[in-house]
Image (cartoon, rainbow, N blue to C red):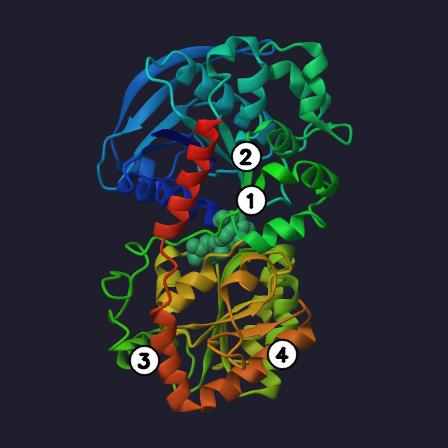
Amino acid sequence: MKIFHLSAECYPLAKVGGLADVVGALPKYQNQLGCDSMVIMPFYNTKYTQNNTFEEVFSGRIHLGSHLVDFQILNLKSDDLGFEVFCVHIPELLYRTDVYCNDDSFRFMAFQVAALDWIKQMQNLPDIIHCHDHHSGIVPFMMSHSFVYERLRYIPSVLTIHNGQYQGWTGMETASLIPHFKADRLGFLIWRNMINPLASAIKCAWKVTTVSPSYMQELMYKANGLEDLLRHESAKCVGILNGIDTSVWNPKDDGNLMKTYTARTSASGKQANKEFLCKEFNLNPEKPLVAFIGRLVGEKAADLLPYACDFGLETTDANILILGSGDPQVEYQLNALKEKHHGRYNAFIGYDEKLSHLIYAGADFLLMPSRVEPCGLNQMYALRYGTVPVVNRVGGLKDTVVDFSLEHGFGVTFDNASVADIVNAIQRCMYFYSEEKRFKANQKTMMGIDHSWDKSAQDYLDLYTSLKQN
Ligand code: ADP
Ligand code: GLC
């Protein structure tokens, strides 16, 4: 089965968050199941694209309203990823160091139109076109309604919603950029008087998935304005839990670590990484280490972190380490805490992939107080590295973490994104940590939990197959 994934991000070419990790892993696992799965994405100016070789396989010109835009399709010359990558190269629009900019409606429209122009002339058309988030959300509409893409009309399209908060809203004038379609189809693009690419994809894709079952249920009631639409389309909606790439995220041979380890050697392995981390960040390796890794935005409840860290440090013995970037106000507050809690708290404001691996390995607890978490990969990485996830029970966090007070429990959970709940959770972490024997045994248990893509990749295949049979 030939599958094209269309996405704005794909690890290791360009990563802002978990979308990249998913699109950088799912095709590989699908190929292991015998598919021919590949990724189409914009060609950005990143370290990876600078340091790797790409070959032009197609060139063309698209009309976006009155604009004429030349593009090339570049094929990554590497077998390392386990899947093929094709990049849409439009130097003046896409070749930038940032994945997301403030002219994204136009940029991603160009990406989508160029991608379909390339696909439509192929001798062997794909069996499935799988769109990820709103950046490729106009594709299902164009496949169904634009005259130039008539050849693609019967190819099933799938939309995966990684994050329903962002929908790509844009003004009505954007409709004029889309290759010609019948005027009475305009409604498929619109939601609440705006062109809404995510809503359009929910209306036009053959199937809509989200990245965890609980998030799909939540979206029916809380979807940043799309609740009614999702309820209306619920028959074609399904939640499939993300997996993790266990070859990239493996403490046994992770080159980013100070010391690699397995479940058997977890106690000494984790301690060595903790000691290194604590030395780097002036923390005390004898104390329980609580970490946070993530985008400093409202969805992650990052605005609560400065207060929760402050009270948590005042009322417990914990050390706290933060890795993240985002809201400048939160960044400022998190930096400001360094002085007050010198020697017990530190924060690295920025993005650092290597450091994130070290923290998953060296921390005792990983805090995720998210208000919204469609799936969340961090808690699954934490488990893989024997680190206790401490999570607010929403979305994918609810589907993957069981509180240690319950039968077969291994994590720490709470039910509100509030300062009081986070501080209370940190206090419970201290209690858990003090039960040394159980705590160490739990590290091994967590490392044995299987969140690899094997099962979910098969679930996606079953879904594609059901569409091909219709
Ligand atoms: P989201 O996609 O909403 O940001 P996920 O939990 O799905 O959340 O994925 C986040 C991914 O981004 C993980 O791979 C995490 O390790 C990584 N990440 C987030 N912030 C940083 C950072 N500051 N430095 C390094 N990696 C980060
Ligand atoms: C989004 C979500 C996150 C999810 C990721 C990958 O960025 O915020 O919860 O894990 O996509 O699907």
- Give the side of residue 441 with respect to residue 165, left or right: left
In percent of width and height, residue 158 lies at 51, 33
**Which comes sooner in the sequence, label 1 or label 3?**
1
Q: Amino acid at mark 1?
A: Val
Residue wearing tag 2 = 207
Tell me, yes or no, whether the two marked residues, 2 and 3, touch with CB atoms within 8 Å.
no
Q: 10 Å neighbourhood of mark 4: few (<14), some, or many (≥20)?
A: many
Residue wearing tag 4 = 423
- State the SS at label 4: helix
Q: CA distance from mark 2 to mark 4?
A: 41 Å
Can I make out residue 463 in this image? yes
Q: Amino acid at mark 2?
A: Lys
Q: CA distance from mark 4 to mark 1?
A: 35 Å
Residue wearing tag 1 = 238
Residue wearing tag 3 = 271
Residue for point 66% across, 53% down: 218
Q: CA distance from mark 1 to mark 3?
A: 41 Å
Q: Amino acid at mark 3?
A: Gln
Q: Amino acid at mark 4?
A: Val
